[in-house]
Amino acid sequence: MLYVSTRGGMPAQPFCDVLLEGLAPDGGLAVPQSLPSISSSQLEAWRKLSYPELAACVLGCFATDIAPELLGQMTAQAYTPEKFSSADIVAVRPLSDGMSLLSVSEGPTLAFKDMAMQFLGQVFPHVLQQRGATLNILGATSGDTGSAAEYAMKGKAAVSVFMLSPHGRMSEFQRAQMYSLQDTNIHNIAVRGVFDEAQDIVKALAGDLPFKEKYRLGAVNSINWARIAAQVVYYFWGWLRATTGPGQQVSFAVPSGNFGNILSGHMARRMGLPIRRLVLATNENNVLEEFFHTGIYRPRKPAQTHVTSSPSMDISRASNFERFVFDLFDGDSVQVAKLWKALGSEGYFDLSSHLSEFESKYGFVAGVSNHENRLATIRRVFDETGNLIDPHTADGVKVAKPFVEPDIPMLVLETALPAKFSETIEEALGRPVPMPYGLEDLLGRPQKFTTLPCNVASVRDYIIEHATIS
Ligand SMILES: *Cc1c(COP(=O)(O)O)cnc(C)c1O
């Protein structure tokens, strides 16, 4: 399988070549030139596989330049019962009203980002070793992505992580989770500023091409194609667990921000997985919900982005959305390039002429959830089923409810565990969440981080001093 840019300006390349890149040189995103289609007999043959075995098969469709046997070793290392607190790796837990949770947050950092990052933690060292190269991953995080990247890369040869976080602005749990890592290849940098400023520093350094080259800077942000590919696996897994035979349909509800998770569901559906609906849930930052209801995509500025109690979805510019629009236009990269140009000058684009296709052709529906809905849903789910769900998952359950149909399982993606967002759970239920097994002492563990002033020069100097280059 080869990958091209959504905007048409990149020669076709195999998986391992797009793996280490961020944006394509033309500003677009890497997408497969064509997708394999998985027959229903193939799907039935996959029913008996374990999660790592299924992951090797599904990822084998995308990473055709990695030997299947090697891919099998990587997924076996990435998805172990020791790292994921569920023996199945991803469990399906029934709620009420025809809904179930797809538990994709049983990994080391208690959010679904682990599903993709743990695979990157295997495939990056492999490709780097093959090329005799090193990589310094530079990123900014407001929580989940940074910690998932650090837990996946800790102790890996040839990879270092430089993760900027806004000093004093993460939850106590998130801080403890990241800063308690003592590995020498993990660099936690707390900058005295807010997340957007940290992000700007990363953009400035990654945009300085000679510096980027010399210090082998790379990224693991949500536009990374390998992350999308690794997430496709759990849609297949969820379908296989929720059905008993060929052709049965399943719907998925996905708490969304950057459109990465649900894009993987869209890819699975395009590969022939019998998905009825993809229910996109947003919080008060509803740019994507607005698009699916009006056809108008109008990203918002950081100042117009609300701070909410489902903070990992406080996103007003959905980085992966361009890949969906590319499919809407049947892979016409000239049209996509035009739209993003218009977006740059006008601040929006209007695809209302495609409105009827969103659901009929692609299965997409959407809805919004707010703080009150979130609290009420956490309470209701707990009272009715005894399950504690996190605020993001609650947004998914709230939005999914009106779309549940008789005899069609609705799998809501559990994008984080409640312990990560205990404050909101306490607001909803009047009591905090117990720490998960094995993490009881997390808040007391010694922490290792460097505090830097919020400017490019300080971070640049730190990287020069600590980067791995060979
Ligand atoms: C990252 C994240 C999301 C949003 O996922 P996207 O792929 O950006 O749409 C939702 N919930 C949680 C808990 C997250 O960490």
Image (cartoon, helix red, strand yellow):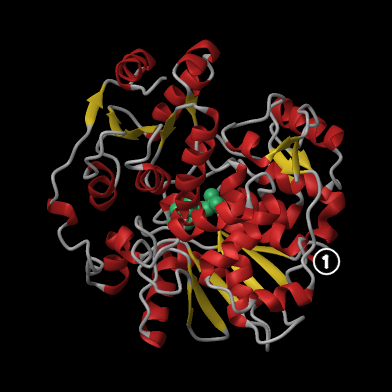
Picture quadrant where residue 65 is located: top right
Check the image and report above or below for 265 versus 162: below
Residue at 28% of width from left, 44% of height from top?
178
Residue at 86% of width from left, 40% of height from top?
332
Residue toward you, 81 or 26: 81
The CB of the residue at mark 1 lies under 8 Å from ligand 1: no
Q: Is residue 28 left or right of residue 159?
A: right
Whether residue 275 can be seen here: yes
Residue 57 percent across, percent down from the top left: 64, 62
Residue 53 percent across, percent down from the top left: 56, 66
Residue at 49% of width from left, 75% of height from top?
101
Residue toward you, 146 or 272: 272
Q: Is residue 351 left or right of residue 463?
A: right
Residue 214 percent across, percent down from the top left: 47, 14
Q: Is residue 352 left or right of residue 394?
A: right
Callout 1: helix, strand or loop?
helix
Check the image and report above or below for 27 versus 101: above
Residue toward you, 429 or 331: 331
* Mark 1 Cα-neighbour bin, 10 Å: few <14, some 14–19, many ≥20: few
Q: How many marks?
A: 1
Residue denoted by label 1: 360
Check the image and report above or below for 176 versus 394: above
Residue 326 percent across, percent down from the top left: 78, 44
Q: Is residue 353 left or right of residue 93?
A: right
Residue at 40% of width from left, 74% of height from top?
87
* Amino acid type, callout 1: Ser
Picture quadrant where residue 230 is located: bottom right
Whether residue 283 can be seen here: no
Residue toward you, 387 or 120: 120
Check the image and report above or below for 346 versus 16: above
Q: Quadrant of the C terminus?
A: top left
